[in-house]
């Protein structure tokens, strides 16, 4: 039975960037080989189950799964526009350094650290001086072409 919209699909996956860096996986062995397990010690590595059409995964992944069958393996290459989009200057926000320092309990953020906004999105501090702090809220994988090796475990 081929995967179609509305199906519940369980899959194993490994996601790579163009330079072959593994950024995510459902497989514990891959996570251990690549250092992801060390970087995310509390994460459980297990097959992912998604309902096709519910936008639980990026658009290009969902589109790439349609038509596959249980037991099948496939490599999906997903361009930025079907993944996390292109980086946007609109996603870089400026804060007054003193105001942000007060919000952080007196600490001045450093470039390269991450802050969480009130809406839950995470941003990287990309500039700090006496007047202004710039935080980049673009998704970490914005602008990246993503390659996923997927194995369809089950289709319901």
Image (spheres, rainbow, N blue to C red):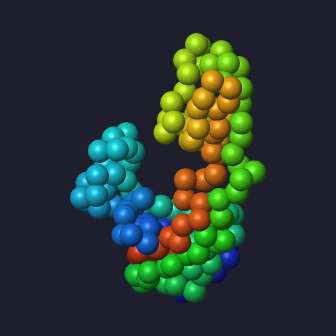
In the depicted structure, whether residue 61 falls above or below residue 113: below
In this rendering, position of residue 71 left or right of residue 96? left
In the depicted structure, whether residue 34 falls above or below residue 91: below
In this rendering, position of residue 21 left or right of residue 7? left
Write the residue at 64% across / 51% down.
138
On the image, the x and y values in percent for residue 120 come to 65, 37
Q: Which of the two residues, 20 or 38, is positioned nearer the viewer here? A: 20
Write the residue at 44% across / 82% down.
74
The quadrant holding residue 33 is bottom left
The quadrant holding residue 123 is top right
Write the residue at 65% across / 46% down.
137
In this rendering, position of residue 89 left or right of residue 154? right
Write the residue at 64% across / 32% down.
133
Whether residue 144 is visible to the viewer of this picture, yes or no, is: yes
Q: Which of the two residues, 135 or 76, is positioned nearer the viewer here? A: 135
Q: Which of the two residues, 11 or 134, is positioned nearer the viewer here? A: 134
Whether residue 100 is visible to the viewer of this picture, yes or no, is: no
Quarter of the rendering occupied by the C terminus: bottom right
Q: Which of the two residues, 55 or 71, is positioned nearer the viewer here? A: 55
On the image, the x and y values in percent for residue 126 come to 57, 41
In the depicted structure, whether residue 72 falls above or below residue 91: below
Which residue is outermost to the front?
Answer: 130
The quadrant holding residue 124 is top right
Say how many tags the image has: 0
């Amino acid at each position: 039975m081929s995967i179609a919209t509305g199906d519940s699909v369980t899959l194993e996956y490994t996601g790579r960037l163009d330079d072959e860096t593994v950024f995510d996986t459902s497989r514990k062995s891959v996570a251990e080989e690549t250092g992801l397990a060390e970087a995310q010690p509390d994460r459980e590595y297990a097959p992912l189950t998604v309902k096709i059409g519910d936008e639980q995964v990026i658009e290009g992944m969902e589109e790439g799964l349609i038509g596959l069958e249980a037991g099948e393996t496939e490599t999906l290459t997903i361009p930025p526009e079907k993944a996390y989009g292109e980086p946007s200057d609109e996603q870089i926000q400026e804060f007054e350094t003193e105001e942000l320092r007060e919000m952080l309990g007196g600490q001045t953020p450093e470039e390269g650290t991450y802050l969480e906004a009130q809406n839950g999105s995470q941003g990287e501090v990309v500039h700090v001086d006496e007047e202004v702090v710039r935080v980049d809220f673009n998704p970490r994988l914005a602008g990246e072409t993503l390659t996923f090796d997927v194995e369809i475990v089950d289709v319901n």
